[in-house]
């Protein structure tokens, strides 16, 4: 009996290492599979994070419409048509072009605007052709820039003309900015059947910046500082008009 028990005990001890070995194998296999699965999961997550963000099928410019406004700038007179002589003898066509070029430069800095000019140097352009340029281009606005004159050198001030109802808001906006910036006498916004306005098919105005026959106003109009202030005021008034027009659509 003693030998019999001992043999059973020995048998049990002989089986135990084998069981432990099997269990260790199972654990190692499970650990290996877990590591493999974890690696694949991490790789999948990493790959997902590296994927580029999906781009909307719509174009940003189509989702948020941004309208471009075509502006035709007309520097009054030119070439064989000098316009009015100022108190100093400088012809109107000179200051008209200088201010128009500065307005053009400012507007070109804003991608909201496309800009063209009826003349960029001392050339003569028929009045009918000025309006035709704006009409053929399908411009949204025509700005005609001039300087005023009168036999009495004490007369002064800025005034702005429009022809049709669609030009009234434009004239009002730009005129007020100009008067505020320059401090010249406010001669108001007026209806006038000037040909350049009558022939234009879009909101069109003619700006009389000031009186060249008034020595004090002429000095400002011919100065670099004065022209810069006028150009900025015209641009500010135009932008205000565009914003107000967009708000009412």
Image: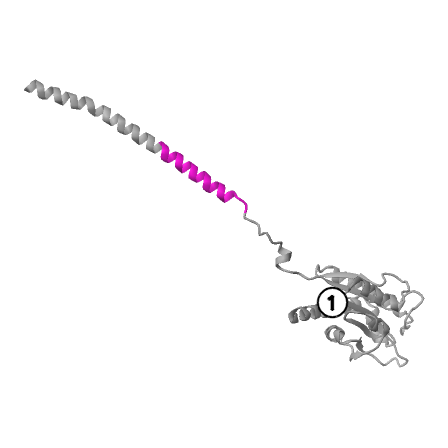
What segment carries the magenta color?
Answer: 32-52
97 is higher (above) or lower (below) than 159:
above
Foreground residue among 5 and 103: 5
Residue 219, visible in the rendered structure? no
Magenta span: chief secondary structure:
helix
78 is higher (above) or lower (below) than 2:
below
Rendering coords of residue 77 (x, y %): 88, 68
Rendering coords of residue 98 (x, y %): 83, 65
**Which residue does the numbered mark 1 point to in the structure image?**
235
50 is higher (above) or lower (below) than 138:
above
- Element type where label 1 sits in the image: helix
Could you tell me which residue is drawn at 79 percent across and 64 percent down? 72
Foreground residue among 124 and 226: 124
Task: Specify whether residue 94 is painted magenta.
Answer: no
Number of dots carrying numbers:
1
Would you call the spot at circle 1 few (<14 residues within 10 Å), some (14-19), or many (20 or more)? Answer: many
Name the image quarter holding the N terminus: top left
């Amino acid at each position: 009996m003693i030998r019999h028990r001992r043999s059973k005990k020995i048998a049990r001890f002989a089986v135990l290492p084998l069981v432990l070995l099997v269990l260790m194998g199972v654990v190692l296999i499970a650990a290996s599979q877990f590591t493999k699965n974890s690696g694949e999961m991490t790789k999948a997550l990493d790959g997902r994070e590296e994927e580029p963000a999906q781009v909307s099928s719509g174009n940003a410019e189509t989702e948020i419409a941004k309208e471009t406004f075509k502006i035709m700038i007309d520097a009054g007179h030119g070439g064989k048509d000098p316009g009015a002589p100022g108190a100093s003898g400088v012809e109107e066509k000179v200051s008209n072009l200088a201010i128009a070029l500065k307005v053009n430069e400012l507007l070109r800095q804003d991608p909201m605007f496309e800009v063209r000019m009826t003349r960029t140097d001392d050339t003569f352009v028929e009045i009918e052709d000025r309006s035709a340029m704006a009409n053929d281009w399908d411009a949204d606005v025509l700005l005609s820039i001039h300087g005023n004159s009168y036999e009495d050198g004490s007369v002064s001030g800025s005034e702005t003309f429009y022809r049709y109802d669609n030009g009234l808001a434009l004239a009002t906006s730009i005129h007020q900015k100009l008067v505020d910036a320059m401090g010249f006498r406010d001669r108001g916004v007026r209806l006038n059947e000037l040909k350049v306005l009558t022939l234009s098919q879009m909101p069109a105005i003619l700006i009389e910046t000031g009186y060249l026959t008034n020595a004090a106003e002429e000095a400002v109009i011919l100065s670099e500082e004065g022209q810069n202030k006028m150009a900025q005021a015209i641009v500010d008034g135009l932008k205000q008009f565009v914003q107000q027009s967009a708000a009412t659509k």
